[in-house]
Amino acid sequence: MQWTQTAVLVKPDGLQRGLIGEIINRFERKGLKLVGIKMIDMDDEMLSEWYAEHKDKSFFGDLKSFMSSMPIVAMVWGGIDAVSVVRKLVGTTLGREAEGGSIRGDFGMSQQFNLIHASASDEDAKREIGIVFDKDELFAYEHAMEQLIYADYERSLK
Ligand code: CMP
């Protein structure tokens, strides 16, 4: 149990499908704290770094073209165990098999067009946040709801 941050991208299909508000709403309702948000075009260099683990996969080229085909919305969310909390809300990679109630389970049918990216580990989150965000684009502020969302012993872990 620890306070962490995680990176989220609403992919081109999520943008086109008008799901940005829906996605933000789900994270806000859960009790996660928005730490940073921006709309960007991801270029080839950025995507090669972001998806380095997939560089030898057959779909690497397609994935990069898809991700650079239009802007994406990048976000950083924080909270206790934020990486695993967000992964659960997002659902498994393949939309048509993703759990009902998750973002992909409720809105997706595809593997590549799976609407959203969420960091897989704390280490990935740190790396991914560093690719897209400068330090001054990440905000530390008091989240008034925190006292209702977490117990004192959980807040004291910060
Ligand atoms: P994500 O898990 O966010 O990061 C890797 C992405 O690669 C994944 O989402 C999918 O969008 C994409 N992907 C995974 N497997 C395939 C595949 N077999 N063909 C095309 N794209 C894929």
Image: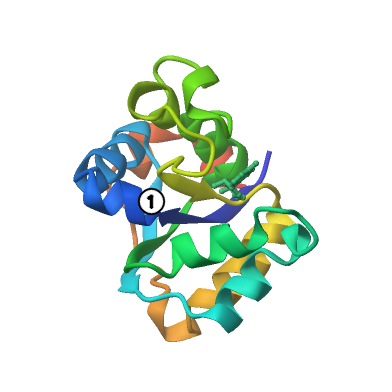
Residue drawn at x 47%, y 34% is 90
Provide residue 148's location: percent of width, then percent of height: 34, 33
In the rendered image, the residue lying farthest to the right is: 56
The answer, for residue 158, to whether it is visible in the render is no
Q: Residue 29's spot in the image, x, y percent?
A: 29, 33
Q: Is residue 23 left or right of residue 150?
A: left
Picture quadrant where residue 40 is located: bottom left
Q: Is residue 122 above or below residue 25?
A: below
For residue 85, what is the image quadrant? top right
- For the residue pair 89 and 30, the one nearer the viewer reads as 89
Give the SS element for disc 1: strand
Residue 21: percent from left, percent from top: 20, 45
- Outermost residue toward the top? 100
Q: Which residue is mark 1?
A: 33
Pick the front one: 77 or 66: 66
Q: Is mark 1 within 8 Å of ligand 1?
A: no
Residue at point 45% right, 75% down? 42
Tell me the residue at 37%/37% (across/down): 31
Q: Amino acid at mark 1?
A: Lys
Say if 143 sits above or below 154 in the image.
below
Question: How many numbered marks does the figure carry?
Answer: 1
> Of 85 and 104, which appears nearest the observer?
104
Vertically, is 18 above or below 44? above
**Which residue is at 61% across, 37% downward?**
84
Q: Is residue 120 left or right of residue 153?
A: right
Residue 66 can be seen, yes or no: yes
- Which quadrant of the figure contains the N terminus? top right
Quarter of the image containing the C terminus? bottom right
Q: Residues within 10 Å of mark 1 (few under 14, many from 20)?
A: many
Using the image, determine if residue 105 lies above or below residue 3.
Answer: above
Q: Residue 18 in the image: state x and y as whole percent.
A: 19, 45
